[in-house]
């Protein structure tokens, strides 16, 4: 500083080098660990042994000790902050548990009292099981988790999500406290997945509207936790009958991931928004797209942009209007579907709440038109206004020609 008496005070300092290299390290925190953050005015006066000795007494005790060594005339800024780790997060606790991951599972195996009766998935990691004459679904960690830590981490996170995400649109889940293997339990749902259901019949319009509301509410619930489902599709929706009505349950806790995640593994190609194929992050708009494709398929039995295979680079064109396959679909609901599956993300709904409002207020839904829709269809009033002025100018021009 230029001001007299402050010549030794720096207003902006990084270092003597041209470039700044960030030093960092990683370590696993444990319960009751203490972290000391301090300035060099402290650690130049107290060596490591002294820091360890006085650390339990708190930051004030450390600074007081340093000051005492200098006769209460510290030559430099001496600052200390101590962070105490009260507990580790739930995911870390779950991962640290000493649990077995069975390599093979077969019908009749009994694990912690749960008897395996029927494998639900080809890899034999998800089973219907029975305990005390009651049926459950039990899901085990993948075999790869034995050697691959990333696979283990993903399953541990899945267990944590299954344990904490309690809502009516999910099956009830539990994690037995005294389990001996890595698995979690779901209530058995007596129903059929929507993909299988659609092979025989389409959903009625009222049923599709109810499904749309369920998927939006589920997505809004997850957003409170900064999460998205990540793989909304008919295979992950269970249809059950209750009091003469269809009820929908959403499954697959393994696909749930953080909103704005850029993982390319989440989702199924035919339900992915176009921007997802460009490594765009998962967000409300991409989830709305998956919901829209699911509703389109539920009412028509078709994919709006055709079935997309894994590793395929798709070309998206304007889809056929849903009512061409199912003329029972009201125009307002068709507009909701088309806006949800718009390949132009700027035309798509931005938030779940936007979709829910229009589904619940059909009289306020405006017709949706793609940018390529002819103006005569998308805005006939504008078309006729333009036509009127063009004809007026043309007639005036002809009048001038005739009078000359």
Image: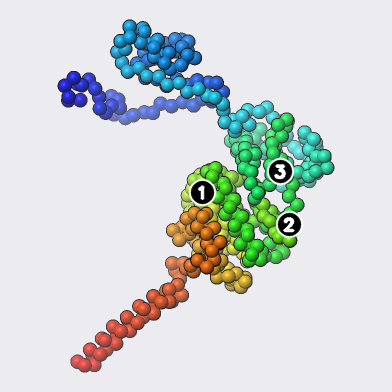
Report the residue marked by disc 1.
282
- Percent position (x, y) of residue 339? 50, 62
Query: Which sits earlier in the primary sequence, circle 1 or circle 2?
Result: 2
Identify whether 127 is placed above or below 402: above
Query: Which sits earlier in the primary sequence, circle 3 or circle 1?
Result: 3
The N terminus - image quarter: top left
- Percent position (x, y) of residue 252? 64, 47
Secondary structure at numbered mark 2:
strand
Badge 2: residue crowd in 10 Å (few <14, some 14–19, many ≥20): few
Secondary structure at numbered mark 1:
loop
- Percent position (x, y) of residue 268? 59, 52
118 or 175: nearer the eye? 175
Give the CA distance from mark 3 to mark 1.
27 Å
Report the residue marked by disc 3.
186
Identify whether 178 is placed above or below 61: below
Residue at 41% x, 16% y is 60
- Percent position (x, y) of residue 109? 80, 37
Report the residue marked by disc 2.
242
Q: Which mark is residue 10?
A: none
Image quadrant assignment for residue 103 = top right
Does the rendering let one see residue 61?
Answer: yes
Q: Are marks 3 and 1 in contact (CB under 8 Å)?
A: no
Give the CA distance from mark 1 to mark 2.
33 Å
């Amino acid at each position: 500083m230029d001001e007299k008496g402050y010549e030794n005070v720096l207003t902006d300092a990084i270092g003597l080098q041209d470039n700044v290299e960030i030093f960092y390290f990683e370590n696993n925190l444990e319960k009751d660990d203490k972290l000391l953050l301090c300035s060099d005015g402290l650690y130049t006066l107290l060596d490591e042994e002294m820091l360890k000795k006085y650390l339990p007494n708190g930051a004030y005790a450390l600074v007081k000790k340093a000051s005492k060594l200098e006769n209460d005339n510290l030559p430099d800024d001496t600052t200390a902050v101590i962070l105490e780790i009260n507990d580790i997060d739930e995911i870390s606790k779950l991962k640290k548990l000493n649990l077995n991951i069975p390599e093979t599972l077969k019908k009749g195996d009994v694990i912690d009292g749960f008897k395996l009766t029927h494998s639900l998935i080809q890899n034999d990691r998800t089973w219907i099981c029975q305990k005390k004459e009651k049926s459950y679904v039990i899901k085990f960690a993948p075999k790869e988790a034995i050697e691959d830590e990333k696979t283990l981490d993903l399953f541990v996170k899945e267990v944590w999500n299954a344990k904490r995400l309690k809502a009516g649109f999910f099956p009830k889940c539990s994690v037995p406290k005294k389990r001996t293997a890595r698995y979690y339990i779901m209530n058995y749902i007596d129903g059929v997945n929507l993909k299988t259901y659609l092979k025989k019949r389409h959903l009625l319009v009222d049923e599709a509207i109810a499904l749309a509301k369920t998927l939006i509410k589920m997505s809004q619930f997850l957003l409170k936790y900064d999460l998205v489902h990540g793989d909304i599709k008919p295979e992950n929706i269970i249809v059950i009958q209750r009091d003469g009505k269809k009820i929908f349950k959403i499954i697959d806790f393994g696909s749930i991931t953080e909103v704005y995640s850029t993982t390319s593994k989440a989702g199924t190609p035919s339900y992915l928004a176009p921007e997802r194929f460009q490594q765009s992050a998962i967000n409300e708009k991409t989830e709305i797209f998956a919901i829209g494709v699911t509703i389109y398929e539920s009412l028509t039995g078709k994919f709006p942009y055709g079935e997309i295979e894994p590793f395929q680079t798709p070309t998206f064109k304007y889809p056929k209007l849903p009512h061409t396959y199912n003329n029972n679909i009201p125009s307002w609901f068709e507009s909701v579907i088309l806006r949800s599956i718009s390949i132009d993300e700027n035309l798509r709904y931005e938030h779940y709440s936007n979709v829910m409002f229009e589904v619940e207020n059909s009289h306020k839904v405006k017709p949706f038109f793609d940018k390529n829709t002819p103006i005569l269809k998308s805005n006939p009033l504008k078309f006729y206004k333009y036509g009127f002025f063009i004809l007026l100018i043309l007639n005036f021009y002809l009048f001038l020609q005739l009078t000359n």
